[in-house]
Amino acid sequence: MTPAGAIPAALPARAVDGPSAQAMFAALQAHARSAGITLRNPPPEPTTCCGRGCNGCVWEGFADAAEYWRQEALLQLQG
């Protein structure tokens, strides 16, 4: 079991797309589980993208929400 307050040596980077977000979520959730910490559920991926590269795309909002979740998770892991 990893002691509380121990942050992963290689911190997951900010998500830039769906796959990198899922990998980041999984890495931090696994680390939290090993430390006995329960994290809130990560944000769901958007389902309404039209694929036209809109200004203010739903994926931009998802990336921001994923980063907020990452920062919150890191704070919880710090203790």
Image (spheres, rainbow, N blue to C red):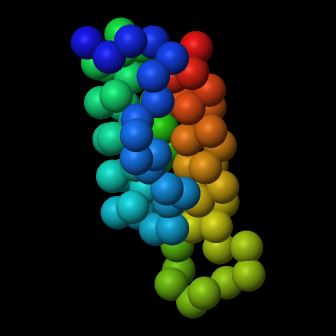
Residue 50 against residue 25 in the figure, above or below: below
Residue beneath the point at 43% across and 55% down: 21
> What x and y, as percent, mark residue 56?
73, 73
Q: Residue at x 56, y 32 (%)?
A: 74
Q: Nearer the viewer, residue 5 or 57?
A: 5
Does residue 16 appear left or right of residue 67 in this picture?
left
8 or 69: which is nearer to us? 8
| For residue 70, side relative to residue 27 (left or right) | right
Residue 25 location, quadrant: top left
Which residue is rendered at x = 45% and y = 12% of the image? 4
Comparing 1 with 51, the one in front is 1
Residue 20 drawn at (x, y percent): 39, 61
Residue that sits furthest to the bottom in the current view:
52
- Above or below: residue 60 compared with residue 24: below
Q: Against 69, is 60 above or below?
A: below
The answer to whether 43 appears left or right of 64 in the picture is left
The residue at 29%/30% (across/down) is: 30
**Residue 11 seen by the camera:** yes
* Quadrant occupied by the C terminus: top right
Q: Position of residue 55 (x, y in %)?
A: 73, 81
**Residue lying furthest right:** 55
Q: Residue furthest front?
A: 9
Of residues 78 and 29, which is closer to you in this image?
78
Q: On the image, which quarter does residue 14 sit in?
A: bottom right
Q: Is residue 73 left or right of residue 27?
A: right
